[in-house]
Image (cartoon, rainbow, N blue to C red):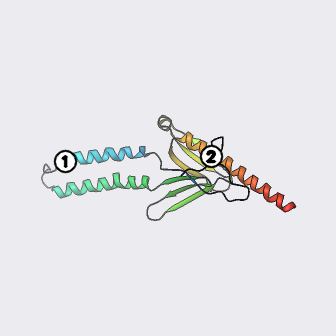
Amino acid sequence: MTQPVSLGGRPMMPPPGAPAEERLIARFRSQARGLLWSSLLLIAVCGATAFFYDNLPDGFQNWMLLAVAAVLIVVGVVIPYFVWFSRTYTVTTRRVIVRQGMGARKRREISHVRGYTIGVHRGILQRMQGAGTITLSNGMDTALQLVNVPNVTLVHEALADQIEVNQILAHRDAQSLGDTDRS
């Protein structure tokens, strides 16, 4: 089901004073380019294990080789994957939410209505891949960083649009409340 749209293509705004429904705009993770080294390590460990299995020098046994390979895979492949997988960025029509952690979850939010500055930092590799790091700062709390955001220009534009729309709605609602106080 889609929401109704006005002639300009933007969603229709709710009537003054009515609460606006919170809708999901985007949910994404950071780019997985940091997992390149983990995948190369996995390939190297599997290849070395296959080569040295039943071909070890005297004094070493196959179970030792398998134990070392398992430790390398857990530390160098599984843990980095879970660290990457545990961080999620969510942009809704009301706020930006950053969730991270597997067991104990850490969650930070920043509201569009209060307004914030958007800073974008892009290194050379990030520019080549279309990624970047977005920093959201409202001037009061510590800055919220969205690290290695894929398609950073699109996310930047969506965030700027949401700030504008939410501040227009807040201003309009404040004006309509001010009009009812006068009468």
Q: Position of residue 40 (x, y in %)?
A: 32, 44
- Residue 103 quadrant: bottom left
In this rendering, the answer to whether 58 lies above or below 123 is below
Cβ atoms under marks 1 and 2 closer than 8 Å? no
Q: Position of residue 138 (x, y in %)?
A: 66, 52
Kind of residue indicated by mark 2: Val
Q: Position of residue 49 (x, y in %)?
A: 21, 49
Left or right: 21 as drawn, with respect to 123: right
Residue at mark 1: 50
Left or right: 94 as drawn, with respect to 38: right
Q: Secondary structure at mark 2?
A: loop
**Residue lying at 25% horizontally and 55% vertically, measured from the top left:** 68
Residue at mark 2: 5
73 vs 95, nearest the viewer: 95
135 vs 168, nearest the viewer: 168
- Estimate the spatial distance between the alpha carbons at disc 1 and disc 2, rounded to whole Å: 59 Å
Farthest residue in the right direction? 183
Which of discs 1 and 2 lies nearer the camera? The answer is 2
